[in-house]
Image (cartoon, helix red, strand yellow):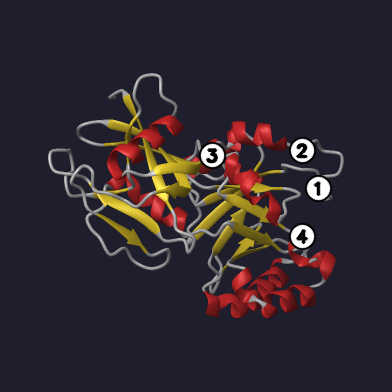
Amino acid sequence: MNKWVDVVAGVLQAPNGDFFLSSRPPGKPYAGYWEFPGGKLEAGETPYQALVRELDEELGLTVEEATPWLTQHFHYEHASVRLSFWRVTRWQGQPQAREGQTWAWQPAAGALNVAPVLPANTPVFRALSLPDTLTLTCASETGAAAILARIGADPAAFPLVIVREPGWAEADRVQLAHEIRALTAGSGGRVLLAGTTMPVAGLDGVHLTAAQLMALDVRPAADWAGASVHGQEELEQAARLGLDYVMLGHVMPTPSHPGVPPLGWSRFAGLAGGRWPMPVYALGGMQPQDMQTARAHGAHGIAWMRGAWQ
């Protein structure tokens, strides 16, 4: 196998979620293909240093805020690349075609309006469609009526809901999931059922427990599949199965795990840190004000439960 070539790529995102692609200039492999801007790490560079340099050299942009996000491994005919994707949410300047490339902003939702796309970049588009916040139900504590009323009052605030309720019969969990799906369908929301490996008609996918994840040999046959994870082995399994996301925790103390020491942000960053091909959400004691901290430690966003329904 070829030696891995370390490459960094910047995922520039506008406040509305739209993202930036540029075409590879003439003279480079795959000239004319569209990609997230970036390039190879030079000797002694960190990924962040390479990101700052590349976006300045290619586009004349000064990076002001960027966080580690995903890592993809891909084999091309000319090289095997390890791509470190960073989300760039603040920068100075307007894009300039310093290498003769073209560029275009792409919509956060819907189909791309450019082609062809460099193959290693394709999986990132699916990750970009995931929201910053996942919401888990706790109807066994609040009552289903309270959850449905809260969602019904502002469906757009719940772009992805995971129906948890481990103490309920599956038929009751499925019923609640369908009721939530009816409320969020108009705003494009997704609803996943936790605790099952089999897709349910009318829902958008499944969310696995750590035990279910480790028992599988293949990815569940659902449109969307995620899992709860607690450590390195489970993260590796999720990557091996090609899951769409994971929730890693618990990061902070939480009533769901009394007496169990939390990971804390340092340990979370060591496990997540933008090292995986799937987005990693921070779980456990999360509140909206934790979003920036979570991203700084390599999270895609946060997953919360009780706080969402208060």
Please report the residue visible at 70 percent of the width from the left and 68 percent of the height from the top: 173
Q: Secondary structure at mark 3?
A: helix
The kind of residue tagged 4 is Gly
Distance from disc 2 to disc 3, alpha carbons, whole Å, reads 22 Å
The kind of residue tagged 1 is Thr
Give neighbour class at mark 4: few <14, some 14-19, many 20+ (Cα, 10 Å).
few
The kind of residue tagged 2 is Pro
Distance from disc 1 to disc 4, alpha carbons, whole Å, reads 11 Å
Q: Position of residue 46 (x, y in %)?
A: 44, 27
Of labels 1 and 2, earlier in sequence is 1
Distance from disc 1 to disc 3, alpha carbons, whole Å, reads 25 Å
Looking at the image, the residue that sits furthest to the right is: 259
Whether residue 282 sits left or right of residue 129 in the image: it is right
Of labels 2 and 3, earlier in sequence is 3
Give neighbour class at mark 2: few <14, some 14-19, many 20+ (Cα, 10 Å).
some
Of labels 4 and 3, earlier in sequence is 3
Distance from disc 4 to disc 3, alpha carbons, whole Å, reads 29 Å
Residue matched to label 3: 237
Residue matched to label 1: 254
Quadrant of res 133: bottom right
Distance from disc 1 to disc 2, alpha carbons, whole Å, reads 8 Å
Nearest to the eye among marks 1 and 4: give it.
4
Of labels 1 and 3, earlier in sequence is 3
Of labels 2 and 4, earlier in sequence is 2
Give neighbour class at mark 1: few <14, some 14-19, many 20+ (Cα, 10 Å).
some
Residue matched to label 4: 307
Q: Secondary structure at mark 1?
A: loop
Residue matched to label 2: 262
